[in-house]
Image (cartoon, rainbow, N blue to C red):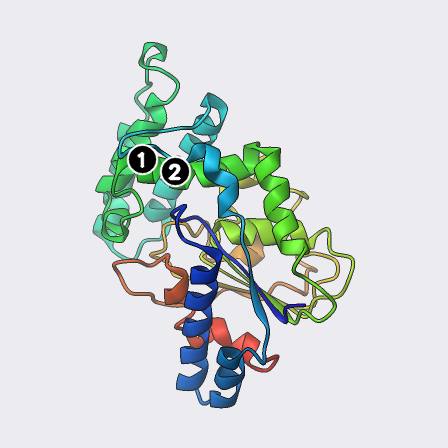
Amino acid sequence: MAELVMVHGIGPEDETEQRLREDWTRALARTLRDNGRAGAADRLEAGAVTADMAYYRHLYQDYVPRDDFDVRLPAPIAATGEEVSRDIIDNIRRHASDPDDREEAADALEELTVEVGPEQGPLEPLRMFVSMMGRLGPIARSGFAALSSTGAFHLGQVAAYLDDERVREGAIEAVLSRVTPDTKAVLAHSLGTVVAYEALHRLDQPLPLLVTFGSPLGLRSIIRGRLRPQPLRSPAHLKRWVNVADRDDFIVATLKLRKLFPEDDAVLERTRRVGNRNFDPHAATEYLSHWETVEPLAELL
């Protein structure tokens, strides 16, 4: 019966549902209070506004690395992870604010065009991409690929959602089981924006608001034959959709998500841009520190 349903994205396997919910709630309340909405902040922290986290990270247990260099991904999922990693590097090339970061990403893509021989094994291309990603400024500063196993696991979460129906259906059910007629808003981050997109297309009741941030919606590796439904369009029962992006967030596929949707789609608004702290521009709590992200929720809470 949650009024606010949160949908997390990629991250470490030991990050629990309770910790994520508390971190997001704390960040939301702080931003509300900082912008003159102390009453809403108090209600949220006191539980008068009910909030729940649609948690699905446990579904990745089969893919959790056993050590710092382990990659436990089947070959097809590793191949999808390679596609996703190429798109992430291209995100940096296209819209990073620092020209040096853009140039570095362009050089990396050129270097990675060298074909990997089949004798090196099906996981070797992914290892190469993860290694290259870890050297790029925005990714290196964030720790996204601090270890080869960390980077591969993060990419593997996206790839497994797209390729493993058990993971996909479990994640979608985690959202739908929490959205009720009392739900006022869904708040989704990172891969969670893809999960929310697909889940809300199955929703058979009105939903006032969806807020997405740090979204990979628009990545070629996700859209091309994988995202459901296609072509891109807003869920039928959704009344308002606000998307928020930081140009230095390497997971963000586009700063103009609206352009990927039909011209007559009146639900998705023009993307709001924010500037997160440079060392981790993809962090959910960074996005939640901005009024641009929280303001649409304020009037509903």
Q: Position of residue 160 (x, y in %)?
A: 51, 35
Q: Answer whether residue 227 is visible to the viewer in this image.
A: no
Q: Is residue 273 above or below residue 70?
A: below
Q: Quadrant of residue 35?
A: bottom left
Q: Residue at x 55, y 80 (%)?
A: 298
How far apart, in angstroms, are the residues tagged by discs 1 and 2?
Answer: 6 Å
Circle 2 — which element? helix
Q: Amino acid at mark 2?
A: Phe
Kindly identify which residue carries mark 2.
Answer: 153
Kindly identify which residue carries mark 1.
Answer: 149
Q: Is residue 21 left or right of residue 124?
A: right
Q: Is residue 22 above or below residue 15?
A: below
Q: Amino acid at mark 1?
A: Ser
Q: Is residue 236 left or right of residue 242?
A: right
Q: How crowded is the residue under tag 2: few (<14 C-alpha within 10 Å), some, or many (20+)?
A: many
Q: Position of residue 122 (x, y in %)?
A: 39, 18
Q: Is residue 44 left or right of residue 134?
A: right
Q: Are marks 1 and 2 in contact (CB under 8 Å)?
A: yes
Q: Residue at x 70, y 66 (%)?
A: 207
Q: Position of residue 50 (x, y in %)?
A: 59, 73
Q: Position of residue 114 (x, y in %)?
A: 30, 21
Q: Answer whether residue 179 is visible to the viewer in this image.
A: yes
Q: Is residue 33 above or below residue 290?
A: below
Q: Residue at x 65, y 60 (%)?
A: 178
